[in-house]
Amino acid sequence: MLNSARENLKTMPELEAVTSLIHSSIEDFATDLKFDFIYSIGTLAEYCEFSENLLAKIISYLKPGGYFFFTLVDSESFDSNEYIWHRKKLMRILLQVLPKSIRNKVDAGWLTNKDWKHLFLSREQVEIILQSSSVSMKWELSKAKDSLHMHHICKVWLE
């Protein structure tokens, strides 16, 4: 992903000079740097939990007037009746009994929406998290649909 981002940045010299690409999970990331713009598309509440603590951490990395833009899958758009091929269903059963270290290395193609459902959030849950911030900020929350889900699209900015 970082190599792809570097290649894309080469086509935009004005952004390349002011963009930092960092290899880290958000849970492990720590810095004293402050950023004008932070974004997360298709990661929060899909591959890591979006919570009051995570929001506070990300907001702490923004400069005054900075923006945080992100998307989250809407839990209410999850289809619990999704069709699963028999082979995929068998692999899902096997994944449940394998050690986590092995499960994490398995191709995500064997997994389905159900494997991430516990991380998805309703609009009300997102609003509660956003309202929990002790930092003076404003936010906008809207929805968009892709081929699989409804997504919350959120823009947060510091005053």
Image: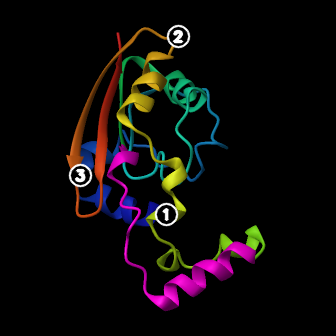
Question: Is 159 located above or below residue 40 in the figure?
Answer: above
Around disc 2, counting alpha carbons within 10 Å, would you say few (fewer than 14), some (14 to 19), or many (20 or more)?
Answer: few
**The one of 143 and 62 positioned closer to us in this rendering:** 143
Q: CA distance from mark 2 to mark 1?
A: 33 Å
Around disc 3, counting alpha carbons within 10 Å, would you say few (fewer than 14), some (14 to 19), or many (20 or more)?
Answer: few
Q: Which mark is residue 114?
A: 1
Residue at 29% over, 62% down? 148
Observer-side mark, 2 or 3, equals 2
Going from N to C along the chain, the mark reached first, 1 or 3, is: 3
Q: Which residue is mark 2?
A: 134
* Quadrant location, the C terminus: top left
Q: Which mark is residue 91?
A: none
Around disc 1, counting alpha carbons within 10 Å, would you say few (fewer than 14), some (14 to 19), or many (20 or more)?
Answer: few
Query: Which region of the structure is painted magenta?
Result: 72-97
Question: In x, y percent, where is residue 69?
Answer: 34, 35
Which quadrant of the figure has residue 68? top left
